[in-house]
Amino acid sequence: MSNLISSFSPVDGRLVAKRKIASRKDVAVTFAAAHAAQKDWKNLSIAERGKYCAAAVDAMLAMKDEIVPELALQMGRPVRYGAGELRGFEERARYMISIAEKALAPIQPEAKSGFTRYIKREPVGVVFTIAPWNYPYLTAVNSIIPALMAGNAVVLKHASHTLLVAERFQQAFEKAGLPKGVFQHLVLSHDQATEIILGGLVNMVCFTGSVPGGKAMEQAAVGRFLNVGLELGGKDPAYVRSDANLAHAIENLVDGAFFNSGQSCCGIERIYVHKSLYKDFVDGFIDLTKKYVLGSPLDEATTLGPMIKPEAAAFVRKQIVAATRAGATAHIDSKLFAANKIGTPYLAPQVLTNVNHQMSVMRDESFGPVVGIMKVSDDKEAIQLMNDSEFGLTAAIWTSDVEAAARIGDEIETGTVFMNRCDSLDPALTWTGVKNTGRGATLSQIGYEAVTRPKSYHLRTTL
Protein backbone atom coordinates (compact mmCIF):
# COMPACT_ATOMS: atom_id res chain seq x y z
CA MET A 1 0.00 0.00 0.00
CA SER A 2 1.30 3.44 -0.90
CA ASN A 3 2.27 5.71 1.98
CA LEU A 4 1.14 8.76 -0.02
CA ILE A 5 -2.23 10.36 -0.67
CA SER A 6 -2.54 12.37 -3.87
CA SER A 7 -5.18 14.96 -4.69
CA PHE A 8 -6.01 15.39 -8.38
CA SER A 9 -8.06 18.29 -9.68
CA PRO A 10 -11.43 17.66 -11.34
CA VAL A 11 -10.68 20.71 -13.50
CA ASP A 12 -8.08 19.05 -15.69
CA GLY A 13 -6.67 16.11 -13.75
CA ARG A 14 -3.54 17.93 -12.58
CA LEU A 15 -1.89 16.92 -9.32
CA VAL A 16 -2.89 19.47 -6.66
CA ALA A 17 -1.20 17.94 -3.64
CA LYS A 18 0.70 14.85 -2.59
CA ARG A 19 1.16 14.21 1.09
CA LYS A 20 2.69 11.44 3.18
CA ILE A 21 0.22 9.40 5.21
CA ALA A 22 0.79 9.62 8.94
CA SER A 23 2.75 6.73 10.44
CA ARG A 24 1.63 4.83 13.53
CA LYS A 25 4.14 6.88 15.50
CA ASP A 26 2.77 10.13 14.04
CA VAL A 27 -0.73 9.13 15.08
CA ALA A 28 0.31 8.17 18.59
CA VAL A 29 2.31 11.37 19.10
CA THR A 30 -0.49 13.56 17.73
CA PHE A 31 -3.17 12.17 20.00
CA ALA A 32 -0.90 12.09 23.04
CA ALA A 33 -0.18 15.77 22.42
CA ALA A 34 -3.90 16.51 22.01
CA HIS A 35 -4.83 14.86 25.30
CA ALA A 36 -2.00 16.64 27.13
CA ALA A 37 -2.81 20.05 25.64
CA GLN A 38 -6.52 19.70 26.36
CA LYS A 39 -5.91 19.51 30.11
CA ASP A 40 -4.58 23.07 30.12
CA TRP A 41 -6.85 24.39 27.36
CA LYS A 42 -10.02 23.48 29.24
CA ASN A 43 -8.84 25.59 32.20
CA LEU A 44 -8.74 28.78 30.14
CA SER A 45 -11.81 30.96 30.41
CA ILE A 46 -14.34 30.89 27.59
CA ALA A 47 -13.38 34.48 26.78
CA GLU A 48 -9.71 33.51 26.45
CA ARG A 49 -10.53 30.59 24.19
CA GLY A 50 -12.72 32.91 22.17
CA LYS A 51 -9.84 35.32 21.52
CA TYR A 52 -7.76 32.50 20.01
CA CYS A 53 -10.65 31.26 17.87
CA ALA A 54 -11.56 34.74 16.65
CA ALA A 55 -7.94 35.36 15.71
CA ALA A 56 -7.92 32.11 13.75
CA VAL A 57 -11.02 33.24 11.84
CA ASP A 58 -9.25 36.51 11.01
CA ALA A 59 -6.19 34.59 9.86
CA MET A 60 -8.26 32.34 7.62
CA LEU A 61 -10.04 35.29 5.99
CA ALA A 62 -6.68 36.96 5.35
CA MET A 63 -5.84 33.98 3.09
CA LYS A 64 -8.96 34.45 0.91
CA ASP A 65 -7.12 35.38 -2.27
CA GLU A 66 -5.16 32.15 -2.09
CA ILE A 67 -8.01 29.97 -0.87
CA VAL A 68 -10.58 30.80 -3.58
CA PRO A 69 -8.62 29.52 -6.62
CA GLU A 70 -7.18 26.73 -4.49
CA LEU A 71 -10.70 25.60 -3.64
CA ALA A 72 -11.72 25.62 -7.32
CA LEU A 73 -8.73 23.47 -8.21
CA GLN A 74 -9.38 20.98 -5.42
CA MET A 75 -13.12 20.36 -5.77
CA GLY A 76 -14.35 22.26 -8.83
CA ARG A 77 -16.55 25.05 -7.49
CA PRO A 78 -16.38 28.14 -9.76
CA VAL A 79 -14.12 30.92 -8.46
CA ARG A 80 -17.03 33.37 -8.69
CA TYR A 81 -18.60 31.52 -5.74
CA GLY A 82 -15.47 30.64 -3.78
CA ALA A 83 -15.60 33.60 -1.41
CA GLY A 84 -19.14 32.58 -0.44
CA GLU A 85 -17.86 29.56 1.44
CA LEU A 86 -15.50 31.75 3.46
CA ARG A 87 -18.37 34.11 4.28
CA GLY A 88 -20.33 31.16 5.56
CA PHE A 89 -17.30 29.92 7.47
CA GLU A 90 -16.98 33.31 9.14
CA GLU A 91 -20.69 33.58 9.94
CA ARG A 92 -20.80 30.18 11.62
CA ALA A 93 -17.53 30.59 13.49
CA ARG A 94 -18.26 34.06 14.83
CA TYR A 95 -21.80 33.12 15.84
CA MET A 96 -20.67 30.06 17.78
CA ILE A 97 -17.96 32.11 19.48
CA SER A 98 -20.51 34.79 20.39
CA ILE A 99 -22.96 32.40 22.08
CA ALA A 100 -20.41 30.26 23.91
CA GLU A 101 -20.67 32.03 27.27
CA LYS A 102 -24.43 31.59 27.36
CA ALA A 103 -24.49 28.10 25.86
CA LEU A 104 -21.84 26.78 28.24
CA ALA A 105 -23.10 28.58 31.35
CA PRO A 106 -24.05 26.34 34.30
CA ILE A 107 -27.71 25.37 34.48
CA GLN A 108 -29.28 26.54 37.71
CA PRO A 109 -32.33 24.60 39.00
CA GLU A 110 -34.86 26.31 41.27
CA ALA A 111 -33.54 27.25 44.69
CA LYS A 112 -33.55 24.59 47.40
CA SER A 113 -32.92 25.53 51.01
CA GLY A 114 -29.65 24.19 52.36
CA PHE A 115 -28.22 23.23 48.98
CA THR A 116 -26.27 24.73 46.11
CA ARG A 117 -27.12 22.90 42.90
CA TYR A 118 -26.01 23.37 39.32
CA ILE A 119 -25.07 21.49 36.16
CA LYS A 120 -21.86 22.32 34.32
CA ARG A 121 -21.01 21.56 30.70
CA GLU A 122 -17.66 19.75 30.68
CA PRO A 123 -15.58 19.19 27.51
CA VAL A 124 -15.56 15.59 26.30
CA GLY A 125 -11.78 15.63 25.70
CA VAL A 126 -10.37 15.11 22.21
CA VAL A 127 -12.71 15.53 19.24
CA PHE A 128 -11.86 13.77 15.97
CA THR A 129 -13.38 15.68 13.03
CA ILE A 130 -13.58 13.82 9.72
CA ALA A 131 -14.57 16.34 7.04
CA PRO A 132 -15.71 15.95 3.39
CA TRP A 133 -14.63 17.73 0.22
CA ASN A 134 -17.90 19.30 -1.02
CA TYR A 135 -18.03 22.20 1.47
CA PRO A 136 -14.64 21.66 3.08
CA TYR A 137 -14.51 24.81 5.23
CA LEU A 138 -18.18 24.93 6.21
CA THR A 139 -18.54 21.29 7.24
CA ALA A 140 -15.31 21.33 9.24
CA VAL A 141 -16.00 24.58 11.09
CA ASN A 142 -19.35 23.22 12.31
CA SER A 143 -17.57 21.04 14.84
CA ILE A 144 -14.08 22.55 15.13
CA ILE A 145 -14.98 25.95 16.60
CA PRO A 146 -17.66 24.70 19.04
CA ALA A 147 -15.36 21.88 20.18
CA LEU A 148 -12.50 24.29 20.86
CA MET A 149 -14.71 26.89 22.52
CA ALA A 150 -16.06 24.19 24.83
CA GLY A 151 -12.55 23.29 25.98
CA ASN A 152 -11.80 20.29 23.79
CA ALA A 153 -8.74 19.60 21.68
CA VAL A 154 -9.37 18.79 18.00
CA VAL A 155 -7.69 16.54 15.46
CA LEU A 156 -8.86 17.04 11.86
CA LYS A 157 -8.76 14.50 9.05
CA HIS A 158 -9.84 16.04 5.76
CA ALA A 159 -10.92 14.30 2.57
CA SER A 160 -8.16 13.37 0.13
CA HIS A 161 -9.58 15.79 -2.48
CA THR A 162 -9.16 18.74 -0.10
CA LEU A 163 -5.89 18.10 1.70
CA LEU A 164 -4.95 21.77 1.43
CA VAL A 165 -8.00 22.80 3.46
CA ALA A 166 -6.71 20.98 6.54
CA GLU A 167 -3.41 22.78 6.10
CA ARG A 168 -5.21 26.14 5.90
CA PHE A 169 -6.95 25.39 9.21
CA GLN A 170 -3.58 24.51 10.73
CA GLN A 171 -2.02 27.72 9.42
CA ALA A 172 -4.89 29.82 10.74
CA PHE A 173 -4.66 28.40 14.26
CA GLU A 174 -0.89 28.70 14.28
CA LYS A 175 -1.10 32.34 13.21
CA ALA A 176 -3.61 32.86 16.02
CA GLY A 177 -1.05 31.53 18.51
CA LEU A 178 -3.21 28.61 19.63
CA PRO A 179 -1.32 26.54 22.23
CA LYS A 180 0.52 23.63 20.64
CA GLY A 181 -1.46 20.41 20.47
CA VAL A 182 -4.91 21.97 20.87
CA PHE A 183 -5.61 21.80 17.12
CA GLN A 184 -3.80 19.40 14.79
CA HIS A 185 -4.47 17.74 11.47
CA LEU A 186 -3.39 14.38 10.09
CA VAL A 187 -3.26 12.89 6.60
CA LEU A 188 -4.89 9.50 7.05
CA SER A 189 -6.33 6.62 5.08
CA HIS A 190 -9.88 5.45 5.77
CA ASP A 191 -8.51 2.38 7.54
CA GLN A 192 -6.34 4.53 9.80
CA ALA A 193 -9.32 6.66 10.79
CA THR A 194 -11.15 3.50 11.78
CA GLU A 195 -8.13 2.24 13.72
CA ILE A 196 -7.95 5.51 15.67
CA ILE A 197 -11.54 5.06 16.81
CA LEU A 198 -11.05 1.36 17.54
CA GLY A 199 -7.93 2.20 19.53
CA GLY A 200 -9.79 4.50 21.90
CA LEU A 201 -7.64 7.51 21.05
CA VAL A 202 -10.57 9.94 20.88
CA ASN A 203 -13.54 10.93 23.01
CA MET A 204 -15.84 12.02 20.19
CA VAL A 205 -16.11 11.58 16.42
CA CYS A 206 -17.73 14.19 14.16
CA PHE A 207 -18.16 12.63 10.72
CA THR A 208 -19.67 14.12 7.59
CA GLY A 209 -19.88 11.80 4.60
CA SER A 210 -21.69 8.87 3.07
CA VAL A 211 -24.11 6.47 4.73
CA PRO A 212 -21.64 3.55 4.40
CA GLY A 213 -18.95 5.77 5.92
CA GLY A 214 -21.25 6.63 8.82
CA LYS A 215 -21.97 2.96 9.43
CA ALA A 216 -18.24 2.29 9.52
CA MET A 217 -17.82 5.01 12.15
CA GLU A 218 -20.58 3.54 14.31
CA GLN A 219 -19.19 0.02 13.99
CA ALA A 220 -15.73 1.20 15.02
CA ALA A 221 -17.19 3.01 18.02
CA VAL A 222 -19.27 0.07 19.29
CA GLY A 223 -18.47 -0.70 22.91
CA ARG A 224 -16.22 2.33 23.33
CA PHE A 225 -18.92 4.65 24.70
CA LEU A 226 -17.94 7.47 22.36
CA ASN A 227 -20.08 10.35 21.23
CA VAL A 228 -20.53 9.95 17.47
CA GLY A 229 -22.05 12.76 15.41
CA LEU A 230 -23.01 11.78 11.87
CA GLU A 231 -24.17 13.94 8.98
CA LEU A 232 -24.70 11.58 6.09
CA GLY A 233 -26.70 11.55 2.87
CA GLY A 234 -29.69 13.52 1.68
CA LYS A 235 -32.40 13.45 -0.95
CA ASP A 236 -33.94 16.76 -0.07
CA PRO A 237 -37.41 17.61 -1.40
CA ALA A 238 -39.18 20.86 -2.21
CA TYR A 239 -42.92 21.45 -2.41
CA VAL A 240 -44.35 24.33 -4.43
CA ARG A 241 -47.90 25.05 -3.22
CA SER A 242 -50.58 26.70 -5.33
CA ASP A 243 -50.12 29.99 -3.46
CA ALA A 244 -46.35 30.18 -4.03
CA ASN A 245 -44.60 33.13 -5.65
CA LEU A 246 -43.79 31.31 -8.88
CA ALA A 247 -40.87 33.43 -10.08
CA HIS A 248 -39.20 33.35 -6.68
CA ALA A 249 -39.67 29.58 -6.38
CA ILE A 250 -38.18 28.93 -9.81
CA GLU A 251 -35.16 31.16 -9.29
CA ASN A 252 -34.29 29.73 -5.89
CA LEU A 253 -35.02 26.09 -6.64
CA VAL A 254 -32.89 26.09 -9.79
CA ASP A 255 -30.05 27.43 -7.67
CA GLY A 256 -30.85 24.96 -4.89
CA ALA A 257 -30.65 22.07 -7.33
CA PHE A 258 -27.56 23.02 -9.30
CA PHE A 259 -25.31 25.13 -7.05
CA ASN A 260 -21.99 23.36 -6.44
CA SER A 261 -22.94 21.07 -9.35
CA GLY A 262 -25.62 19.57 -7.10
CA GLN A 263 -22.95 18.28 -4.72
CA SER A 264 -24.61 19.39 -1.52
CA CYS A 265 -26.11 17.21 1.19
CA CYS A 266 -28.98 19.70 1.49
CA GLY A 267 -29.29 20.44 -2.24
CA ILE A 268 -32.72 20.02 -3.82
CA GLU A 269 -32.96 16.66 -5.59
CA ARG A 270 -36.72 16.27 -6.05
CA ILE A 271 -39.52 18.80 -6.47
CA TYR A 272 -43.29 18.41 -6.05
CA VAL A 273 -45.43 21.11 -7.64
CA HIS A 274 -49.14 21.75 -7.24
CA LYS A 275 -50.97 20.92 -10.45
CA SER A 276 -52.21 24.51 -10.87
CA LEU A 277 -48.62 25.79 -11.20
CA TYR A 278 -46.96 22.72 -12.64
CA LYS A 279 -46.66 23.64 -16.34
CA ASP A 280 -45.54 27.22 -15.73
CA PHE A 281 -43.08 26.07 -13.07
CA VAL A 282 -41.52 23.43 -15.30
CA ASP A 283 -41.26 25.80 -18.27
CA GLY A 284 -39.60 28.49 -16.16
CA PHE A 285 -37.30 25.98 -14.48
CA ILE A 286 -36.11 24.64 -17.83
CA ASP A 287 -35.53 28.12 -19.30
CA LEU A 288 -33.39 29.19 -16.33
CA THR A 289 -31.42 25.95 -16.29
CA LYS A 290 -30.40 26.48 -19.91
CA LYS A 291 -28.66 29.71 -18.89
CA TYR A 292 -26.00 27.93 -16.86
CA VAL A 293 -22.44 28.01 -18.16
CA LEU A 294 -20.62 24.70 -17.77
CA GLY A 295 -16.85 24.95 -17.85
CA SER A 296 -13.60 25.39 -15.97
CA PRO A 297 -14.22 26.72 -12.46
CA LEU A 298 -11.17 28.94 -12.89
CA ASP A 299 -13.09 30.97 -15.50
CA GLU A 300 -15.11 33.84 -13.99
CA ALA A 301 -17.90 33.23 -16.54
CA THR A 302 -18.49 29.65 -15.35
CA THR A 303 -21.56 29.05 -13.19
CA LEU A 304 -21.42 25.24 -13.21
CA GLY A 305 -18.11 23.50 -12.63
CA PRO A 306 -17.14 19.85 -12.92
CA MET A 307 -18.22 17.19 -10.47
CA ILE A 308 -15.56 15.90 -8.12
CA LYS A 309 -14.52 12.99 -10.33
CA PRO A 310 -15.56 11.17 -13.54
CA GLU A 311 -17.08 8.29 -11.58
CA ALA A 312 -19.47 10.64 -9.78
CA ALA A 313 -20.65 12.12 -13.09
CA ALA A 314 -21.01 8.63 -14.55
CA PHE A 315 -23.33 7.65 -11.69
CA VAL A 316 -25.64 10.60 -12.37
CA ARG A 317 -25.57 9.93 -16.13
CA LYS A 318 -26.60 6.34 -15.36
CA GLN A 319 -29.51 7.58 -13.24
CA ILE A 320 -30.69 9.87 -16.05
CA VAL A 321 -30.48 7.11 -18.69
CA ALA A 322 -32.33 4.65 -16.44
CA ALA A 323 -35.07 7.20 -15.75
CA THR A 324 -35.63 8.04 -19.41
CA ARG A 325 -35.74 4.37 -20.32
CA ALA A 326 -38.43 3.95 -17.67
CA GLY A 327 -40.53 6.76 -19.17
CA ALA A 328 -39.09 9.99 -17.78
CA THR A 329 -38.71 13.03 -20.03
CA ALA A 330 -35.33 14.79 -20.12
CA HIS A 331 -35.78 18.46 -20.98
CA ILE A 332 -32.20 19.67 -21.34
CA ASP A 333 -30.24 18.89 -24.50
CA SER A 334 -26.70 18.26 -23.24
CA LYS A 335 -25.38 19.52 -26.59
CA LEU A 336 -26.19 23.02 -25.36
CA PHE A 337 -23.23 22.59 -23.00
CA ALA A 338 -20.05 22.11 -25.01
CA ALA A 339 -18.00 21.09 -21.98
CA ASN A 340 -20.30 18.13 -21.28
CA LYS A 341 -18.33 15.00 -22.15
CA ILE A 342 -18.85 11.37 -21.18
CA GLY A 343 -15.89 10.01 -19.27
CA THR A 344 -15.14 13.38 -17.66
CA PRO A 345 -16.47 15.07 -14.52
CA TYR A 346 -18.10 17.78 -16.67
CA LEU A 347 -21.84 17.09 -16.68
CA ALA A 348 -24.65 19.26 -18.05
CA PRO A 349 -27.57 19.99 -15.73
CA GLN A 350 -30.69 17.94 -16.34
CA VAL A 351 -34.39 18.43 -15.56
CA LEU A 352 -36.64 15.34 -15.57
CA THR A 353 -40.42 15.09 -15.57
CA ASN A 354 -42.74 12.07 -15.78
CA VAL A 355 -40.71 10.60 -12.95
CA ASN A 356 -41.83 8.37 -10.09
CA HIS A 357 -40.47 6.91 -6.89
CA GLN A 358 -39.58 3.61 -8.50
CA MET A 359 -36.75 5.44 -10.29
CA SER A 360 -33.30 5.71 -8.72
CA VAL A 361 -33.16 9.41 -9.56
CA MET A 362 -36.07 10.04 -7.18
CA ARG A 363 -34.96 7.58 -4.54
CA ASP A 364 -31.17 7.39 -4.31
CA GLU A 365 -28.91 10.31 -3.53
CA SER A 366 -27.67 11.74 -6.84
CA PHE A 367 -25.26 14.34 -5.51
CA GLY A 368 -25.11 15.88 -8.94
CA PRO A 369 -26.82 18.38 -11.28
CA VAL A 370 -30.08 16.54 -11.89
CA VAL A 371 -33.55 17.07 -10.46
CA GLY A 372 -36.87 15.31 -10.92
CA ILE A 373 -40.17 17.23 -10.86
CA MET A 374 -43.58 15.68 -10.10
CA LYS A 375 -47.11 17.08 -10.15
CA VAL A 376 -49.21 16.79 -6.96
CA SER A 377 -52.86 17.49 -6.19
CA ASP A 378 -52.66 18.71 -2.60
CA ASP A 379 -50.64 19.00 0.61
CA LYS A 380 -51.41 15.45 1.64
CA GLU A 381 -49.92 13.96 -1.51
CA ALA A 382 -46.89 16.23 -1.28
CA ILE A 383 -46.23 15.24 2.34
CA GLN A 384 -46.51 11.55 1.52
CA LEU A 385 -44.00 11.87 -1.32
CA MET A 386 -41.58 14.05 0.63
CA ASN A 387 -41.52 11.49 3.43
CA ASP A 388 -41.07 8.58 1.02
CA SER A 389 -37.29 8.54 1.43
CA GLU A 390 -34.63 6.87 3.55
CA PHE A 391 -33.13 10.32 4.16
CA GLY A 392 -34.26 13.32 6.20
CA LEU A 393 -32.02 16.37 6.24
CA THR A 394 -34.08 19.33 4.96
CA ALA A 395 -37.33 20.03 3.13
CA ALA A 396 -38.38 23.31 1.50
CA ILE A 397 -41.97 24.56 1.25
CA TRP A 398 -42.84 27.37 -1.16
CA THR A 399 -45.98 29.19 -0.07
CA SER A 400 -47.36 32.55 1.06
CA ASP A 401 -49.04 30.91 4.07
CA VAL A 402 -46.77 30.71 7.13
CA GLU A 403 -49.27 28.66 9.11
CA ALA A 404 -49.53 26.13 6.29
CA ALA A 405 -45.74 25.87 6.10
CA ALA A 406 -45.51 25.22 9.84
CA ARG A 407 -48.35 22.69 9.73
CA ILE A 408 -46.81 20.81 6.80
CA GLY A 409 -43.41 21.04 8.45
CA ASP A 410 -44.76 19.26 11.50
CA GLU A 411 -45.55 16.27 9.31
CA ILE A 412 -42.32 16.16 7.35
CA GLU A 413 -39.60 13.78 8.55
CA THR A 414 -36.54 16.03 8.33
CA GLY A 415 -34.12 17.86 10.60
CA THR A 416 -34.87 21.28 9.06
CA VAL A 417 -37.95 22.78 7.43
CA PHE A 418 -37.51 25.78 5.13
CA MET A 419 -40.14 28.17 3.82
CA ASN A 420 -39.39 30.08 0.61
CA ARG A 421 -35.71 29.18 0.71
CA CYS A 422 -33.51 26.10 0.49
CA ASP A 423 -29.95 24.80 0.57
CA SER A 424 -29.11 27.18 3.38
CA LEU A 425 -28.01 27.14 6.98
CA ASP A 426 -28.54 29.53 9.87
CA PRO A 427 -25.97 28.97 12.66
CA ALA A 428 -28.57 30.05 15.24
CA LEU A 429 -30.52 26.91 14.34
CA THR A 430 -29.23 23.43 14.91
CA TRP A 431 -28.11 21.36 11.94
CA THR A 432 -29.34 17.79 12.26
CA GLY A 433 -31.01 14.99 10.36
CA VAL A 434 -33.21 11.94 10.82
CA LYS A 435 -33.38 8.46 9.32
CA ASN A 436 -30.31 7.58 7.21
CA THR A 437 -29.17 11.19 7.19
CA GLY A 438 -27.58 10.45 10.54
CA ARG A 439 -27.77 11.60 14.14
CA GLY A 440 -26.38 14.24 16.42
CA ALA A 441 -26.41 18.00 15.99
CA THR A 442 -24.07 20.87 15.22
CA LEU A 443 -24.37 24.65 15.54
CA SER A 444 -26.77 26.67 17.73
CA GLN A 445 -26.82 26.26 21.49
CA ILE A 446 -27.66 22.59 20.98
CA GLY A 447 -24.41 22.17 19.08
CA TYR A 448 -22.54 22.85 22.30
CA GLU A 449 -24.40 20.05 24.03
CA ALA A 450 -22.99 17.64 21.46
CA VAL A 451 -19.33 18.45 22.28
CA THR A 452 -19.74 18.50 26.06
CA ARG A 453 -21.02 16.27 28.84
CA PRO A 454 -23.19 17.35 31.76
CA LYS A 455 -21.73 17.25 35.26
CA SER A 456 -24.02 17.83 38.24
CA TYR A 457 -23.00 19.55 41.50
CA HIS A 458 -25.17 18.75 44.55
CA LEU A 459 -23.63 20.70 47.43
CA ARG A 460 -25.19 20.57 50.90
CA THR A 461 -24.51 23.90 52.56
CA THR A 462 -26.23 23.37 55.90
CA LEU A 463 -25.98 20.48 58.34
Image: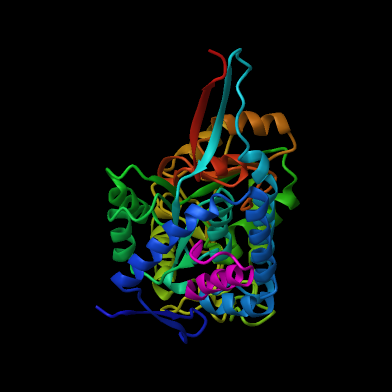
Q: Residue furthest left?
A: 1
* Membership of 176 in magenta stretch: yes
Query: Is 405 left, or right, of 349 in this rendering?
Result: right
Give the image location of residue 20, x and y in percent: 37, 80
**Quadrant of the snapshot with the N terminus:** bottom left
The image shows residue 141 at horizontal and vertical percentages of 57, 58
Residue 402: x %, y % from top left: 72, 33
- Residue drawn 27% across the image and 43% down it: 223
**Residue plotted at (66% across, 34% down):** 405
- In terms of depth relative to the viewer, which is nearer, 204 or 83? 204
Q: Using the image as rendered, state which of residue 45 and residue 206 is in the foreground.
A: 45
Q: Do we see residue 39 in this rendering? A: yes
Asked if residue 131 can be seen in this view, the reply is no
In magenta, the rendered stretch is 162-183
Residue at the image position 54 percent from the left and 58 percent from the top: 139
Note whether 209 is above or below 12 in the view shown.
Answer: above
Residue 34: within the magenta? no
Majority SS type along the magenta span? helix
Looking at the image, residue 404 lies above or below residue 360: above
